Amino acid sequence: MNSFAFIGDMGTGDDNQYRVAKSLKKCIDREDLQFVIGLGDNIYDCGAKSVDDIQFVNKFEKPYSKIDDKIKFYMTLGNHDYGEHYCKCQLEDKELLQVEYGKISQKKGKKWYMPSRYYTFKRGNIEFFALDANVDKHTNKEIDEQIRYMKNKIENSKAKWKIAFGHQPWVSIGDHGNAPRKLQKYFNSLFGSGKIDMYLCGDDHNKQLIEKTLKNKKMILIVCGTGGRETDKPYNLENVKDIKNDLHYFSSTYGIGTIIENIDSLIIKFYDNNLKVEFEYILKSNL
């Protein structure tokens, strides 16, 4: 049975990241968690400058140094990992430096795992679909290629549970809000069939759980961008006024989330930095 943590928006290298990392370590030990899902914005503010950039040490290796290297961090890319418009270092394909760092990390038996911009992997009864949801930074050809690849993987998956994760939200009451038109189209293409049980993301620096009703089932949308960057307060409840989007939980505290797999359910918990459980949700299997 799987048990894992998820965090996003963590790569600051400051005290807040270290505090969340400390609580993550305690939770891994206490709950016997097996791995971590990283939800993007791994290197603030402008991504890495080279594959041996000291930022990988200061904003990843050091904050999580007390976590055993056998605990892998399955990482995905955020907008800051591409570099933003105000960044002085405008390298082409900057995001691919994190992929290369991931390959080196795995050769050395270290934590960071990112074999490609988007990828899939299986852990027991769960298949994971790691997305690169930064569609505003991709050409239409690149978007179409990713959708084709992922839709084929999703449609052919025989896993009991299917969990996707990326950086940008589909629905959110936070600062970034609901996905804009281009991103909506991307999510609808991947998730519209109802084959994915859950989507984990960051980008908004808070914690949310939303039930989204699709044509034939409910899908769980989770935001957890509270790994180190300054947190956001509530913004716009109008974003969940549609009866298809039901907000169950919101918090602007720093902290992490965990998922524990049982025989017929996934138990989702959200924690603050003192490892106090703020919210628990049980997703039952339809099988």
Image (cartoon, grey):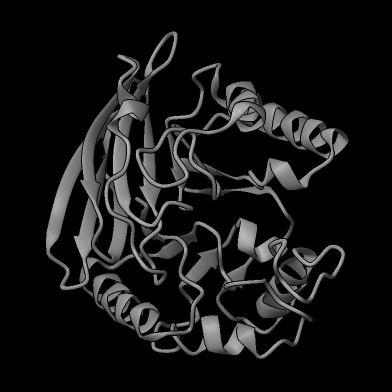
The answer to whether residue 156 is left or right of residue 259 is right
Q: Nearer the viewer, residue 266 or 212?
A: 212
Q: Say which quadrant the C terminus sits in.
A: top left
**Position in image of residue 79 (x %, y %):** 63, 56
Residue found at the far front of this picture? 86
246 w.r.t. 216: above or below: below
**Would you say residue 245 is visible in this rendering?**
yes
| Residue drawn at point x = 43 percent, y = 15 percent | 214
| Residue drawn at point x = 34 percent, y = 79 percent | 16
192 w.r.t. 253: above or below: above
**Would you say residue 77 is visible in this rendering?**
no
The answer to whether residue 60 is left or right of residue 142 is left
191 w.r.t. 88: above or below: above
- Number of residue marks: 0
Quarter holding residue 108: bottom right
Quarter holding residue 101: bottom right
**Position in image of residue 184 (x %, y %):** 59, 27
| Residue drawn at point x = 87 percent, y = 34 percent | 141
| Residue drawn at point x = 55 percent, y = 16 percent | 193
**Position in image of residue 72 (x %, y %):** 51, 69
138 w.r.t. 96: above or below: above
**Position in image of residue 118 (x %, y %):** 69, 49
Residue found at the far top of this picture? 215
